[in-house]
Amino acid sequence: MDQYKGSDVDKYRCFMSGEGEKNTKWKLGVPPNYDAINELFEEGRTKIWPAGSLGEQVQNLVKTWEMELVHKPNSQDHKSVDVTKLTISVNGRKPLKMEDVGKIGGGYNMFLQTSLPEDLRLYNPSDETGDTSHDIFTNTFTRGFALEVLEVYSGPPVIAYKFRHWGYMEGPFKGQPPTGEIVEMIGVSTFELDEQFKIVKIQFFYDRGEFLAGFIKGGSSVTTTQDSTIDVGSSRCPFS
């Protein structure tokens, strides 16, 4: 996994510069700048992996995969995965191929799929596109949504690890006012790699309801179900 040592433009993410990226199509026209997110990460992380360790490499792999998922709209430009084989599933749902992820509106919508009735959804993936979901979360997490790997349970070819995502709700979210408080997503995941250390299968498991509940702290009274948090004091439709 030596290729996951960062790059000359970002010490945590690979495949952002150099000859291999000269023809890459970027979502915003240029490679993303992660300075603000990296600062948030370094201020708020709870674990520092030794340089060159498996934990550091896994963390860089996950950050690289997320960067490519969000910022490289052409899946053929993704270097961390084998796009011809890759499948992704969240909380035991049907595995998706890259084209399926695009059809449902990208990564945020993939993570927030739900079987709840539409009138009980704080964030409704069916209402959002890749662009609108991206705008919602970047406007809520103005400094970004940082990621750290907390534990690595097994190494390649099947990597199992525990992760933590976090950001500060410094902007509104689906009608909920900013709180300035931290919102976290904690879960476990497996990445299956091929001989070239490209990802061919991903599984994520986390509590969707617990994550969404973080956006309504201090708001109107709520009723919590196993799958989601419902705003009963407002006619606004729940979550993203």
Image (cartoon, grey):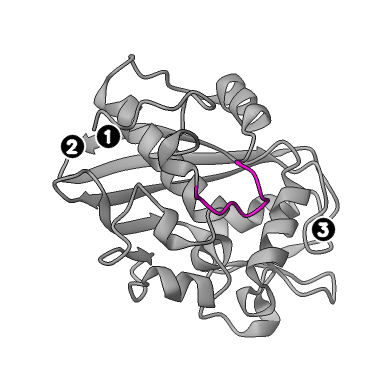
Residue 97 location (% of width, % of height): 36, 71
Vertical placement of residue 64 versus 229, above or below: above
- The amino acid type of the residue labelled 2 equals Gly
Q: Give the spatial CA distance, label 3 vs label 1.
A: 35 Å
| Image location of residue 104, percent across then percent down | 54, 76
Task: Point out the frontmost of discs 3 and 1.
Answer: 1
| Image side of residue 166 versus residue 92, left or right | right
Tell me which amino acid carries mark 3: Gln
Residue tagged 2: 155
> Depth check: 51 or 230 in front?
51
Upstream in the sequence, badge 3 or badge 1? 1
Relative to 73, residue 1 above or below = above
* Residue 30 magenta-highlighted: yes
Determine whether label 1 and label 2 are within 8 Å by CB.
Answer: yes
Q: Which residues are magenta?
A: 23-31
Mark 1 → mark 2, Cα distance in angstroms? 7 Å
Residue 80, horizontal then vertical, whole percent: 34, 47
* Among the 4 quarters of the image, the one containing residue 200: bottom left
Per the image, the residue denoted by label 1 is 152
Residue 200, magenta (yes or no) = no
